Image: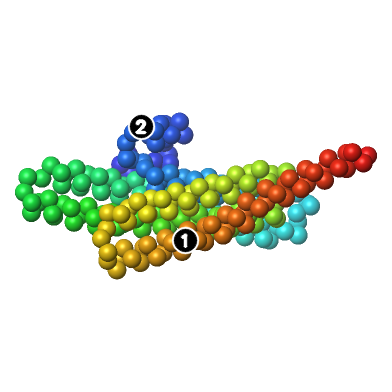
Amino acid sequence: MNHSSLLEVPTGKLLDKFGAGNHKPGSGSAAALMGILSGKLIVTVGYLSRKKPKYRDRHPEIEYLIKQVQDSIEPRLKELFDHDSVVFDQVIKLRIERDKAKSETEKKRLSRQALNALKEATDIPIEICELCLRLLDHASAMFDLGFEPARGDSGAAISAAVAGAMSSIFVVNLNLRSFRESKWAEERRHKVDKLHTQLETAQLDAFSRVGILKEEDIEAIQVELDA
């Protein structure tokens, strides 16, 4: 597609594109898509919570979470979804031209261009990871604050945010294998290591909420037995 977003493609066709054996859209776009899904689920739980008088005291916090997703995180993830597809497509095309080049001079020139494009293709999933970590924090907060019967949606938002962040880390580490030691590469390795540690900590905290539902289930069974 030339000027329109891949996100405008019908869902079935978009999924077919991911499964068509091509590089476009690729894993970076997939990570962004997981983040977008996480954000949508956070917003849905927020909307449901706003309708319930029981959660009136929490509405300001819930409104804040909705606003963060809609005004800041989701629009950027949508941009990155398309941008990753475009930039990585450039990387692949330059690599193909490099392999077809006859002279060593031309091969080296195209190789340098491909590596420069790959730098941008590496920075994109780093930003996607950062945004997904913000979503993970917001999804956990919405689980705690929002409409309790919709905590399945909050849990799915948590899981999607984790998947988006982890997928991004995979992509970055894979891309960095193409670079020799340099200040640029060392900075990215250090950054992605910090993001990975941050994700592990946040994931452990977020997934502890599964235990909350289990405890509530046990308590409900006990009430029934005591009745």
For badge 2, the amino acid type reads Ala
Q: Residue furthest right?
A: 227
Q: Helix or strand or loop: what does disc 2 sit on? A: loop
Residue at point 50%, 54% (across, down): 132
The amino acid sitting under disc 1 is Leu
**Cα gap from disc 2 to disc 1, whole angstroms:** 31 Å
Q: Measuring 46% from the left and 64% from the top, which residue is drawn there?
A: 194
Q: Residue at x 88, y 39 (%)?
A: 224
Q: Is residue 4 visible?
A: no
The residue positioned 28% from the left and 45% from the top of the image is: 89
Mark 2, mark 1: which one is toward the viewer?
1
Q: Outermost residue toward the left?
A: 103
Q: Quadrant of residue 6?
A: top left
Say which quarter of the image contains residue 137.
bottom right
Q: Which residue is mark 1?
A: 195
Residue 68: image location, x then y, percent: 56, 58
Near-viewer residue (16 or 107) = 107
Q: Give the labeled residue for mark 2.
A: 20
> Around disc 2, counting alpha carbons within 10 Å, would you say few (fewer than 14), some (14 to 19), or many (20 or more)?
few
Pick the quarter of the image with the C terminus.
top right
In the shown orientation, is residue 30 left or right of residue 149?
left
Q: Earlier in the sequence, mark 2 or mark 1?
A: 2
93 relative to 84 in the view: left or right: left
- Asked whether 58 or 145 is in front, the reply is 145
Q: Position of residue 36 (x, y in %)?
A: 50, 47
Q: Secondary structure at mark 1?
A: helix
Relative side of 151 to 68, left or right: right
Q: Nearer the viewer, residue 194 or 120?
A: 194
